[in-house]
Amino acid sequence: MILVTGGAGFIGANFVLDWLAGTDEPVVNLDKLTYAGNLQTLASLDGDKRHVFVQGDIGDGALIDRLLAEHQPRAVVNFAAESHVDRSIHGPEDFIQTNVLGTFRLLEAVRGYWSQLPAERKSAFRFLHVSTDEVYGTLSPTDPAFTEENKYEPNSPYSASKAASDHLVRAWHHTYGLPVLTTNCSNNYGPFHFPEKLIPLMIVNALAGKPLPVYGDGMQVRDWLYVKDHCSAIRRVLEAGRLGETYNVGGWNEKPNIEIVKTVCALLDELQPRADGKAYAEQISYVTDRPGHDRRYAIDARKLERELGWKPAETFETGIRKTVEWYLANQEWVRNVQSGGYRDWVAKQYGDKAKEGTQ
Ligand code: NAD
Ligand code: TYD
Protein backbone atom coordinates (compact mmCIF):
# COMPACT_ATOMS: atom_id res chain seq x y z
CA MET A 1 0.00 0.00 0.00
CA ILE A 2 1.21 3.50 -0.81
CA LEU A 3 -0.27 6.84 0.19
CA VAL A 4 -0.49 9.40 -2.60
CA THR A 5 -1.43 13.01 -1.85
CA GLY A 6 -2.92 15.27 -4.52
CA GLY A 7 -3.91 12.23 -6.57
CA ALA A 8 -6.96 13.93 -8.08
CA GLY A 9 -4.84 16.62 -9.74
CA PHE A 10 -3.15 16.51 -13.12
CA ILE A 11 0.09 14.66 -12.37
CA GLY A 12 -1.10 12.81 -9.26
CA ALA A 13 -4.10 11.32 -11.08
CA ASN A 14 -1.95 10.25 -14.02
CA PHE A 15 0.40 8.67 -11.47
CA VAL A 16 -2.41 6.77 -9.71
CA LEU A 17 -3.86 5.55 -13.02
CA ASP A 18 -0.45 4.40 -14.29
CA TRP A 19 0.46 2.85 -10.94
CA LEU A 20 -2.67 0.71 -10.84
CA ALA A 21 -2.26 -0.22 -14.50
CA GLY A 22 1.15 -1.65 -13.66
CA THR A 23 0.69 -3.26 -10.23
CA ASP A 24 -1.99 -4.46 -7.84
CA GLU A 25 -0.42 -2.65 -4.90
CA PRO A 26 -3.27 -0.48 -3.55
CA VAL A 27 -3.23 3.31 -3.28
CA VAL A 28 -4.77 5.53 -0.63
CA ASN A 29 -5.38 8.80 -2.43
CA LEU A 30 -5.69 11.84 -0.16
CA ASP A 31 -6.81 14.98 -1.95
CA LYS A 32 -8.51 18.13 -0.72
CA LEU A 33 -10.37 18.55 -4.02
CA THR A 34 -9.57 22.19 -4.53
CA TYR A 35 -10.60 23.67 -7.90
CA ALA A 36 -7.69 21.62 -9.37
CA GLY A 37 -8.85 18.27 -7.99
CA ASN A 38 -11.12 16.32 -10.31
CA LEU A 39 -12.47 12.90 -9.45
CA GLN A 40 -13.83 12.51 -12.95
CA THR A 41 -10.24 11.98 -14.01
CA LEU A 42 -10.27 8.85 -11.83
CA ALA A 43 -13.68 7.63 -13.04
CA SER A 44 -12.13 4.52 -14.60
CA LEU A 45 -11.23 3.39 -11.05
CA ASP A 46 -14.83 3.51 -9.78
CA GLY A 47 -15.48 0.32 -7.81
CA ASP A 48 -11.79 -0.67 -7.93
CA LYS A 49 -10.92 -1.84 -4.42
CA ARG A 50 -7.23 -1.07 -4.99
CA HIS A 51 -8.04 2.66 -4.93
CA VAL A 52 -9.17 4.23 -1.65
CA PHE A 53 -10.06 7.88 -2.12
CA VAL A 54 -10.17 10.20 0.89
CA GLN A 55 -11.09 13.86 0.66
CA GLY A 56 -8.90 15.77 3.08
CA ASP A 57 -6.05 18.20 3.64
CA ILE A 58 -2.34 17.36 3.95
CA GLY A 59 -2.36 20.03 6.68
CA ASP A 60 -4.77 17.97 8.78
CA GLY A 61 -2.29 16.11 11.00
CA ALA A 62 -4.94 14.10 12.84
CA LEU A 63 -6.36 12.82 9.57
CA ILE A 64 -2.93 11.84 8.27
CA ASP A 65 -2.14 10.08 11.57
CA ARG A 66 -5.35 8.09 11.20
CA LEU A 67 -4.76 7.19 7.55
CA LEU A 68 -1.19 6.06 8.24
CA ALA A 69 -2.22 3.95 11.23
CA GLU A 70 -5.11 2.37 9.34
CA HIS A 71 -3.42 1.67 5.99
CA GLN A 72 0.22 1.14 7.06
CA PRO A 73 1.72 2.39 3.76
CA ARG A 74 5.29 1.53 2.78
CA ALA A 75 5.67 4.89 1.04
CA VAL A 76 4.15 8.36 0.71
CA VAL A 77 4.27 10.27 -2.59
CA ASN A 78 3.47 13.93 -2.07
CA PHE A 79 1.96 15.65 -5.11
CA ALA A 80 -0.50 17.84 -3.16
CA ALA A 81 0.16 21.52 -3.79
CA GLU A 82 -1.19 24.74 -5.14
CA SER A 83 0.50 24.69 -8.53
CA HIS A 84 -0.39 27.67 -10.73
CA VAL A 85 2.07 30.59 -10.89
CA ASP A 86 -0.54 33.15 -12.01
CA ARG A 87 -2.83 32.23 -9.11
CA SER A 88 0.12 32.53 -6.72
CA ILE A 89 0.70 36.10 -7.93
CA HIS A 90 -2.93 37.08 -7.34
CA GLY A 91 -3.36 35.18 -4.05
CA PRO A 92 -0.24 33.71 -2.44
CA GLU A 93 -1.84 32.73 0.88
CA ASP A 94 -3.16 29.31 -0.19
CA PHE A 95 0.33 28.52 -1.51
CA ILE A 96 1.90 29.17 1.88
CA GLN A 97 -0.88 27.28 3.61
CA THR A 98 -0.68 24.10 1.55
CA ASN A 99 2.82 24.04 0.09
CA VAL A 100 4.64 25.18 3.23
CA LEU A 101 2.45 24.51 6.28
CA GLY A 102 0.72 21.53 4.68
CA THR A 103 4.03 19.88 3.83
CA PHE A 104 5.26 20.56 7.36
CA ARG A 105 2.21 18.89 8.92
CA LEU A 106 2.47 15.97 6.54
CA LEU A 107 6.16 15.51 7.35
CA GLU A 108 5.44 15.58 11.07
CA ALA A 109 2.67 12.99 10.81
CA VAL A 110 4.82 10.77 8.60
CA ARG A 111 7.77 11.11 10.97
CA GLY A 112 5.61 9.98 13.90
CA TYR A 113 4.39 6.95 11.95
CA TRP A 114 7.78 6.04 10.48
CA SER A 115 9.67 6.34 13.78
CA GLN A 116 7.62 3.58 15.43
CA LEU A 117 7.76 1.11 12.53
CA PRO A 118 9.62 -2.17 13.12
CA ALA A 119 13.26 -1.99 11.90
CA GLU A 120 12.80 -3.70 8.54
CA ARG A 121 9.77 -1.67 7.49
CA LYS A 122 11.37 1.46 8.86
CA SER A 123 14.42 1.13 6.64
CA ALA A 124 12.32 0.25 3.58
CA PHE A 125 9.98 3.24 4.05
CA ARG A 126 10.15 6.18 1.59
CA PHE A 127 8.75 9.73 1.50
CA LEU A 128 8.94 11.05 -2.05
CA HIS A 129 8.37 14.78 -2.46
CA VAL A 130 7.41 16.02 -5.94
CA SER A 131 8.84 19.43 -6.72
CA THR A 132 9.62 21.70 -9.62
CA ASP A 133 12.54 23.15 -11.57
CA GLU A 134 11.12 26.62 -10.81
CA VAL A 135 12.89 26.58 -7.43
CA TYR A 136 16.18 27.20 -9.29
CA GLY A 137 14.99 30.56 -10.65
CA THR A 138 15.57 31.69 -14.20
CA LEU A 139 18.29 31.10 -16.82
CA SER A 140 19.80 33.34 -19.47
CA PRO A 141 19.76 31.98 -23.04
CA THR A 142 23.38 30.80 -22.73
CA ASP A 143 23.33 29.33 -19.20
CA PRO A 144 23.66 25.55 -18.94
CA ALA A 145 20.52 23.68 -17.90
CA PHE A 146 19.73 23.31 -14.18
CA THR A 147 21.54 20.49 -12.41
CA GLU A 148 20.86 19.31 -8.86
CA GLU A 149 23.80 21.51 -7.80
CA ASN A 150 22.13 24.77 -8.83
CA LYS A 151 21.34 27.28 -6.09
CA TYR A 152 17.72 27.74 -5.10
CA GLU A 153 16.62 31.18 -6.35
CA PRO A 154 12.82 31.06 -6.51
CA ASN A 155 11.14 34.12 -8.04
CA SER A 156 7.37 33.63 -7.81
CA PRO A 157 5.25 33.02 -4.73
CA TYR A 158 4.60 29.54 -6.15
CA SER A 159 8.27 28.66 -6.58
CA ALA A 160 9.18 30.21 -3.23
CA SER A 161 6.56 28.07 -1.49
CA LYS A 162 7.81 24.94 -3.27
CA ALA A 163 11.40 25.82 -2.37
CA ALA A 164 10.34 26.14 1.27
CA SER A 165 8.72 22.72 1.15
CA ASP A 166 11.85 21.19 -0.43
CA HIS A 167 13.95 22.66 2.38
CA LEU A 168 11.63 21.20 5.00
CA VAL A 169 11.86 17.78 3.37
CA ARG A 170 15.65 18.05 3.28
CA ALA A 171 15.78 19.08 6.94
CA TRP A 172 13.50 16.22 8.05
CA HIS A 173 16.01 13.85 6.46
CA HIS A 174 19.09 15.58 7.84
CA THR A 175 17.74 16.10 11.36
CA TYR A 176 15.40 13.16 11.95
CA GLY A 177 16.69 10.65 9.40
CA LEU A 178 13.34 10.46 7.59
CA PRO A 179 14.04 8.50 4.38
CA VAL A 180 13.16 11.14 1.80
CA LEU A 181 13.61 11.57 -1.94
CA THR A 182 12.89 14.76 -3.89
CA THR A 183 12.26 15.13 -7.61
CA ASN A 184 12.44 18.49 -9.40
CA CYS A 185 10.61 18.31 -12.68
CA SER A 186 10.20 20.64 -15.66
CA ASN A 187 6.82 21.65 -17.16
CA ASN A 188 4.51 18.70 -17.65
CA TYR A 189 1.83 18.31 -20.30
CA GLY A 190 -0.57 15.56 -21.32
CA PRO A 191 -4.05 14.17 -20.56
CA PHE A 192 -6.20 15.64 -17.74
CA HIS A 193 -4.25 18.92 -17.55
CA PHE A 194 -6.39 21.70 -16.08
CA PRO A 195 -7.01 24.29 -18.81
CA GLU A 196 -5.50 27.22 -16.95
CA LYS A 197 -1.97 26.09 -17.90
CA LEU A 198 -0.46 27.01 -21.26
CA ILE A 199 -0.96 23.90 -23.41
CA PRO A 200 -4.48 22.84 -22.40
CA LEU A 201 -5.64 26.48 -22.32
CA MET A 202 -4.48 26.98 -25.90
CA ILE A 203 -6.23 23.79 -27.10
CA VAL A 204 -9.47 24.60 -25.33
CA ASN A 205 -9.53 28.28 -26.32
CA ALA A 206 -8.65 27.50 -29.93
CA LEU A 207 -11.55 25.05 -30.23
CA ALA A 208 -13.91 27.56 -28.58
CA GLY A 209 -12.92 30.30 -31.06
CA LYS A 210 -11.42 32.39 -28.24
CA PRO A 211 -8.15 34.39 -28.26
CA LEU A 212 -4.92 32.52 -27.45
CA PRO A 213 -3.22 34.80 -24.88
CA VAL A 214 0.56 34.82 -25.23
CA TYR A 215 2.29 36.70 -22.41
CA GLY A 216 4.83 39.38 -23.38
CA ASP A 217 6.87 38.52 -26.47
CA GLY A 218 6.18 34.77 -26.21
CA MET A 219 9.92 34.06 -26.21
CA GLN A 220 10.09 32.68 -22.67
CA VAL A 221 11.45 29.15 -22.74
CA ARG A 222 10.05 26.15 -20.90
CA ASP A 223 11.33 22.57 -20.97
CA TRP A 224 8.45 20.18 -21.61
CA LEU A 225 7.96 16.65 -20.27
CA TYR A 226 5.08 14.32 -21.11
CA VAL A 227 3.27 13.58 -17.85
CA LYS A 228 3.53 9.80 -18.18
CA ASP A 229 7.32 10.13 -18.44
CA HIS A 230 7.28 12.13 -15.21
CA CYS A 231 5.25 9.34 -13.59
CA SER A 232 7.73 6.67 -14.74
CA ALA A 233 10.58 8.77 -13.32
CA ILE A 234 8.84 9.01 -9.94
CA ARG A 235 8.27 5.25 -9.87
CA ARG A 236 11.94 4.70 -10.65
CA VAL A 237 13.16 7.13 -7.98
CA LEU A 238 10.81 5.56 -5.44
CA GLU A 239 12.22 2.16 -6.32
CA ALA A 240 15.93 2.91 -6.44
CA GLY A 241 16.67 6.55 -5.55
CA ARG A 242 19.40 7.21 -2.99
CA LEU A 243 18.04 8.52 0.30
CA GLY A 244 18.20 12.26 0.82
CA GLU A 245 19.06 12.87 -2.84
CA THR A 246 17.28 15.14 -5.28
CA TYR A 247 16.73 14.13 -8.90
CA ASN A 248 15.98 16.49 -11.78
CA VAL A 249 13.41 15.17 -14.24
CA GLY A 250 13.19 16.51 -17.78
CA GLY A 251 13.00 15.46 -21.40
CA TRP A 252 15.43 17.86 -23.10
CA ASN A 253 12.58 19.70 -24.82
CA GLU A 254 13.24 23.41 -24.48
CA LYS A 255 10.79 25.49 -26.51
CA PRO A 256 9.75 29.14 -26.57
CA ASN A 257 6.10 29.59 -25.67
CA ILE A 258 5.14 30.99 -29.07
CA GLU A 259 6.50 27.86 -30.74
CA ILE A 260 4.35 25.71 -28.44
CA VAL A 261 1.26 27.73 -29.29
CA LYS A 262 1.96 27.54 -33.03
CA THR A 263 2.53 23.77 -32.79
CA VAL A 264 -0.81 23.32 -31.04
CA CYS A 265 -2.49 25.46 -33.72
CA ALA A 266 -0.91 23.45 -36.55
CA LEU A 267 -2.01 20.13 -35.00
CA LEU A 268 -5.55 21.43 -34.64
CA ASP A 269 -5.50 22.70 -38.25
CA GLU A 270 -4.69 19.12 -39.24
CA LEU A 271 -6.91 17.18 -36.84
CA GLN A 272 -9.96 19.47 -36.52
CA PRO A 273 -9.79 22.33 -39.02
CA ARG A 274 -11.74 25.52 -38.31
CA ALA A 275 -15.14 25.60 -40.01
CA ASP A 276 -14.22 28.84 -41.84
CA GLY A 277 -11.05 27.26 -43.23
CA LYS A 278 -8.80 29.82 -41.51
CA ALA A 279 -5.75 28.89 -39.42
CA TYR A 280 -6.09 28.64 -35.62
CA ALA A 281 -2.92 30.76 -35.38
CA GLU A 282 -5.10 33.75 -36.32
CA GLN A 283 -6.49 33.57 -32.76
CA ILE A 284 -3.06 34.26 -31.20
CA SER A 285 -3.18 37.46 -29.14
CA TYR A 286 -0.14 38.97 -27.41
CA VAL A 287 -1.11 40.22 -23.94
CA THR A 288 0.57 41.98 -21.00
CA ASP A 289 3.41 39.94 -19.55
CA ARG A 290 3.21 38.09 -16.21
CA PRO A 291 4.93 40.11 -13.42
CA GLY A 292 8.36 38.69 -12.59
CA HIS A 293 8.04 36.24 -15.47
CA ASP A 294 10.98 33.78 -15.49
CA ARG A 295 12.65 33.88 -18.89
CA ARG A 296 13.96 30.36 -19.25
CA TYR A 297 13.85 26.98 -17.51
CA ALA A 298 15.89 24.00 -18.69
CA ILE A 299 16.54 20.71 -16.92
CA ASP A 300 19.65 18.60 -17.02
CA ALA A 301 18.31 15.14 -16.16
CA ARG A 302 21.60 13.27 -16.58
CA LYS A 303 21.84 12.25 -12.92
CA LEU A 304 18.55 10.37 -13.13
CA GLU A 305 19.55 8.82 -16.46
CA ARG A 306 23.01 7.84 -15.25
CA GLU A 307 22.21 6.59 -11.75
CA LEU A 308 18.81 5.05 -12.28
CA GLY A 309 18.70 4.36 -16.01
CA TRP A 310 15.53 6.43 -16.55
CA LYS A 311 14.69 7.78 -19.99
CA PRO A 312 11.56 9.49 -21.29
CA ALA A 313 9.51 7.45 -23.75
CA GLU A 314 8.05 10.41 -25.66
CA THR A 315 9.66 13.12 -27.74
CA PHE A 316 7.89 16.47 -27.72
CA GLU A 317 6.50 15.75 -31.18
CA THR A 318 4.90 12.43 -30.17
CA GLY A 319 3.72 13.73 -26.81
CA ILE A 320 2.08 16.91 -28.07
CA ARG A 321 0.23 15.01 -30.79
CA LYS A 322 -1.07 12.52 -28.22
CA THR A 323 -2.11 15.42 -26.00
CA VAL A 324 -4.05 17.29 -28.70
CA GLU A 325 -5.70 14.02 -29.77
CA TRP A 326 -6.63 13.32 -26.15
CA TYR A 327 -8.34 16.71 -25.76
CA LEU A 328 -10.25 16.22 -29.02
CA ALA A 329 -11.42 12.78 -27.87
CA ASN A 330 -12.33 13.91 -24.34
CA GLN A 331 -14.49 16.95 -24.87
CA GLU A 332 -16.88 15.89 -22.12
CA TRP A 333 -14.09 16.03 -19.54
CA VAL A 334 -13.20 19.51 -20.82
CA ARG A 335 -16.85 20.68 -20.79
CA ASN A 336 -17.28 19.47 -17.21
CA VAL A 337 -14.17 21.35 -16.14
CA GLN A 338 -15.33 24.50 -17.87
CA SER A 339 -18.87 24.34 -16.51
CA GLY A 340 -17.66 23.44 -13.02
CA GLY A 341 -19.70 20.22 -13.31
CA TYR A 342 -16.69 18.18 -12.19
CA ARG A 343 -17.10 19.59 -8.71
CA ASP A 344 -20.36 17.68 -8.25
CA TRP A 345 -18.59 14.45 -9.10
CA VAL A 346 -17.44 13.76 -5.56
CA ALA A 347 -20.96 14.01 -4.18
CA LYS A 348 -22.36 11.84 -6.97
CA GLN A 349 -19.67 9.18 -6.82
CA TYR A 350 -18.74 9.04 -3.17
CA GLY A 351 -21.48 10.70 -1.15
CA ASP A 352 -20.35 11.76 2.31
CA LYS A 353 -18.19 8.71 2.82
CA ALA A 354 -15.18 10.30 1.16
CA LYS A 355 -15.27 13.31 3.44
CA GLU A 356 -13.16 11.97 6.24
CA GLY A 357 -11.38 15.20 7.05
CA THR A 358 -11.47 16.25 10.66
CA GLN A 359 -11.51 19.97 9.93
P1 NAD B 1 -2.62 20.30 -9.79
O1 NAD B 1 -2.87 21.69 -9.37
O2 NAD B 1 -3.20 19.81 -11.07
O3 NAD B 1 -3.10 19.28 -8.65
C1 NAD B 1 -2.86 19.48 -7.30
C2 NAD B 1 -3.76 18.54 -6.51
O4 NAD B 1 -3.48 18.73 -5.11
C3 NAD B 1 -5.24 18.82 -6.70
O5 NAD B 1 -5.93 17.61 -6.90
C4 NAD B 1 -5.65 19.49 -5.40
O6 NAD B 1 -7.02 19.23 -5.07
C5 NAD B 1 -4.70 18.84 -4.41
N1 NAD B 1 -4.48 19.68 -3.22
C6 NAD B 1 -4.24 21.02 -3.17
N2 NAD B 1 -4.09 21.43 -1.91
C7 NAD B 1 -4.22 20.31 -1.12
C8 NAD B 1 -4.14 20.07 0.27
N3 NAD B 1 -3.94 21.07 1.14
N4 NAD B 1 -4.31 18.82 0.72
C9 NAD B 1 -4.55 17.79 -0.14
N5 NAD B 1 -4.64 17.97 -1.47
C10 NAD B 1 -4.47 19.20 -1.95
O7 NAD B 1 -1.03 20.13 -9.79
P2 NAD B 1 -0.11 19.20 -10.69
O8 NAD B 1 0.23 19.92 -11.94
O9 NAD B 1 -0.71 17.85 -10.75
O10 NAD B 1 1.21 19.17 -9.79
C11 NAD B 1 1.42 18.14 -8.83
C12 NAD B 1 2.74 18.40 -8.12
O11 NAD B 1 3.79 18.44 -9.08
C13 NAD B 1 2.80 19.73 -7.39
O12 NAD B 1 3.50 19.53 -6.18
C14 NAD B 1 3.58 20.64 -8.33
O13 NAD B 1 4.27 21.63 -7.61
C15 NAD B 1 4.53 19.64 -8.97
N6 NAD B 1 5.00 19.98 -10.32
C16 NAD B 1 4.12 20.29 -11.31
C17 NAD B 1 4.60 20.55 -12.60
C18 NAD B 1 3.65 20.85 -13.75
O14 NAD B 1 4.12 21.16 -14.85
N7 NAD B 1 2.34 20.74 -13.58
C19 NAD B 1 5.95 20.53 -12.86
C20 NAD B 1 6.83 20.21 -11.80
C21 NAD B 1 6.34 19.93 -10.55
P1 TYD C 1 2.19 27.77 -17.21
O1 TYD C 1 1.54 26.66 -17.98
O2 TYD C 1 1.34 28.61 -16.32
O3 TYD C 1 3.41 27.10 -16.40
P2 TYD C 1 4.62 27.81 -15.58
O4 TYD C 1 4.29 29.24 -15.36
O5 TYD C 1 4.63 27.03 -14.30
O6 TYD C 1 5.84 27.60 -16.43
O7 TYD C 1 2.92 28.71 -18.24
C1 TYD C 1 3.89 28.20 -19.15
C2 TYD C 1 4.46 29.39 -19.91
O8 TYD C 1 3.43 29.91 -20.75
C3 TYD C 1 4.90 30.53 -19.00
O9 TYD C 1 6.07 31.13 -19.56
C4 TYD C 1 3.73 31.50 -19.06
C5 TYD C 1 3.17 31.29 -20.44
N1 TYD C 1 1.71 31.48 -20.59
C6 TYD C 1 1.23 32.30 -21.62
O10 TYD C 1 1.99 32.90 -22.41
N2 TYD C 1 -0.14 32.44 -21.75
C7 TYD C 1 -1.01 31.82 -20.90
O11 TYD C 1 -2.24 32.01 -21.04
C8 TYD C 1 -0.49 30.97 -19.87
C9 TYD C 1 -1.42 30.27 -18.91
C10 TYD C 1 0.88 30.83 -19.76
Image: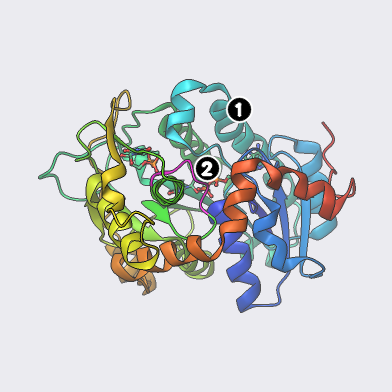
Which residue type carries mark 1?
Answer: Gln
Asked whether mark 1 and ligand 1 are closer than 8 Å, the reply comes as: yes
Residue 195 position, x and y percent, is: 49, 45
Which residue is labeled 1 in the image? 97
The reply to whether residue 192 is in sight is yes
Residue 331 position, x and y percent, is: 56, 58
The reply to whether residue 6 is in sight is no
Q: Depth check: 176 or 247 in front?
A: 247
Ligand 1, what quadrant?
top right
Looking at the image, residue 65 sits to the left or right of residue 328; the answer is right
* Residue 172 higher or lower than 97, as above or below: below
Looking at the image, residue 266 sits to the left or right of residue 50; the answer is left
For the magenta stretch, what is the residue range?
Answer: 193-198
Which residue type carries mark 2?
Answer: Val
Q: Is residue 194 magenta?
A: yes
Residue 169's disc is 2
